[in-house]
Image (cartoon, coloured by chain):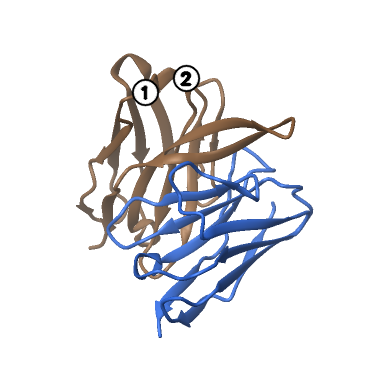
Amino acid sequence: DIQMTQSPSSLSASVGDRVTITCRASQSISSYLNWYQHQPGKAPKLLIYAASSLQSGVPSRFSGSGSGTDFTLTISSLQPEDFATYYCQQSYSTPALTFGGGTKVEIK
Amino acid sequence: EVQLVESGGDLVQPGRSLRLSCAASGFTFDDYAMHWVRRAPGKGLEWVSGVSWNSGGIAYADSVKGRFTISRVNAKNSLYLQMNSLRAEDTAFYYCARERRTLVRGVIMKYFDYWGQGTLVTVSS
């Protein structure tokens, strides 16, 4: 099974900060990598698919990069509505589209 | 508008059974594979099970294999998860999600583009 490891597991940041979250796969997954945002009490939301493609309707301050085993989600200027937990997901080894452990972004 | 609405969550005792439902609307249900994902308290998202559009392909996480059964009735635009022999560690919010496939740079990419709000399953005596 492919293991997905995110870092950090949590971070504190201020509105306006640039935030970077990393995700590492236990083997090469090319660009088969998705990112989601999950806020308490809400449905998870797709942000990025195929490592760097922005989902329709998602603000352009979110971007994704990487291929192979190392990936990054960047929020260029953190907004109040961005405080949430972020997950990467591999779609290389299907049908089990497994997730990373999550990164909780909290207010500093 | 695409909508996924889960139901059936409840408080149940260990060893008992529960059936979750997901009602889909706003899209052609039998065009898409569907999945169940859960989030236990204090933990991250965990993929649970998935079913292809025609039920020809079904898969489970090792943690639920042999206890949970996924199914769908396309005529009713509905997805189900039959959960047997429930354990305390099955306590979680359960979400249904639609699998979207898109051609990106010549390759088919899969991702979950719509999710429901979730239904809470609590397993406790």
Name the image quarter holding the C terminus of chain B: bottom left
Q: Residue B32 location, x and y as percent?
A: 48, 25
Q: Chain letter of disc 2?
A: B
Q: Amino acid at mark 1?
A: Phe
Res B116 → quadrant? top left
Name the image quarter holding the N terminus of chain B: top left
State the separation of the CA atoms marked 2 and 1: 8 Å
| Residue at horizontal 56 percent and vertical 26 percent from the top | B57
| Residue at horizontal 55 percent and vertical 50 percent from the top | A48
Q: Residue A63 location, x and y as percent?
A: 58, 57
Disc 2 residue crowd, few under 14, some 14–19, many 20+, Cα 10 Å: few
The correct choice, above or below, for A91 with respect to A100 in the image is above
**Does mark 1 fall on the same chain as mark 2?**
yes
Res A84 → quadrant? bottom left
Disc 1 residue crowd, few under 14, some 14–19, many 20+, Cα 10 Å: few
Q: Secondary structure at mark 1?
A: loop
Q: Answer left or right for B124 relative to B53.
A: left
Q: Chain letter of disc 1?
A: B
Q: Colour of chain A?
A: blue
Q: Secondary structure at mark 2?
A: helix
Q: Nearer the viewer, residue B108 or A2?
A: B108
Q: Amino acid at mark 2?
A: Asp
Q: Which chain is brown?
A: B
Q: Which residue is mark 1?
A: B27
The correct choice, above or below, for B103 with respect to A36 in the image is above
| Residue at horizontal 49 percent and vertical 63 percent from the top | A86
| Residue at horizontal 39 percent and vertical 24 percent from the top | B72
> CB atoms at circles 2 and 1 under 8 Å apart?
yes
Nearer to us: label 2 or label 1: 1
Q: Which residue is mark 2?
A: B31
Number of the label disc, if any, that sits on residue B10: none
